[in-house]
Image (tube, helix red, strand yellow):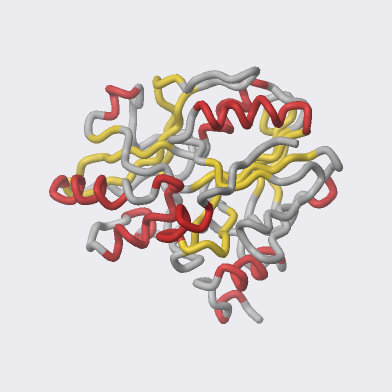
Amino acid sequence: MAMAEADLSDPRRLRAEIRAGRFDAPTAGVGGDALQANLVILGAADAADFLRYCQANPRPCPLLAVGAPGDPSLPALGEGIDLRHDLPRYHVWKTGELAERRTDIADLWRDDMVSFALGCSFSFEAALSDAGIPVRHQDAGRNVAMYRTNIPTRPAGRFSGPLVVSMRAMPAADAIEAVQICARYPLAHGAPVHLGDPALIGIADLAAPDYGDPPDIRDGDIPVFWACGVTPQAAIVEARPDIAITHAPGHMLVTDIPADRAEAILTGIRPTIT
């Protein structure tokens, strides 16, 4: 089936298209109302420290699931998920440097690898749209804009670094409603961490994001910033593990979990390292 004919609102069909190499774009606006996830894969020697880092920084790193060592599936998040194939694009890090950009990581997989799925702000964008709040990067066919800030995260073991935020510009009159809507999605970063002047959080130029695409900002808009699941990639740069694999910013794992029911479905699942 050609990509144009595939139902990209169905998470399983979307993952099949990704696995077949027919979809390699950002996942904003696809997958229907499904919960989307950031991905971090580390060797077992670094996994306990990274779990502690996530627990210390739940806003940018809301834990959804942790895989067993060597297991590329995450059955709590979807039937048949295989993390070696099911994201549109991956980044491969070696000693803190971005070494490769890939669409498949099967040949890099090791028996000691531990996978972490973290909530993603794409998960609440359908709710913003349903409320009539513009999601301008989707309208423009762009990736969301993401920025490193001057806000430090809480260190854990070898992991530390700055908070990364995603930004959505919207009319000032919509910002309070956006806060109220997103607060209902704690597993997708929850409410914004900052509204207004980007310089107050160390962002010099909104037109030059550190990740993603330049934003579409219109007269009367204000910038609204959410904690972002790219934050662990900044921590990987600081920690310099021998190898780490992440999603490419904006290219997420789309799960089978409805975003508006995620907290109820995943309550009681406590990610641990065994």
Quarter in which the N terminus is drawn: bottom right
Looking at this view, is 128 or 45 the one in front? 45
Looking at this view, is 123 or 258 the one in front? 258
Quarter in which the C terminus is drawn: top right
Residue 116, position as x, y percentages in the image: 64, 42
Residue 256 located left or right of residue 44: left
Residue 148 located left or right of residue 100: left
- At a point 74% along the width and 29% down the height, the residue shown is 94
Looking at this view, is 79 or 145 the one in front? 79
- At a point 71% along the width and 53% down the height, the residue shown is 83
Residue 49, position as x, y percentages in the image: 66, 25
Q: In this orientation, does residue 266 appear?
A: yes
Location of residue 5 (image quadrant): bottom right
Q: Is residue 18 above or below residue 175?
A: below
Residue 195, position as x, y percentages in the image: 24, 35
Location of residue 244 (image quadrant): top right
Location of residue 4 (image quadrant): bottom right
Looking at this view, is 120 or 204 the one in front? 120
- At a point 36% along the width and 39% down the height, the residue shown is 226
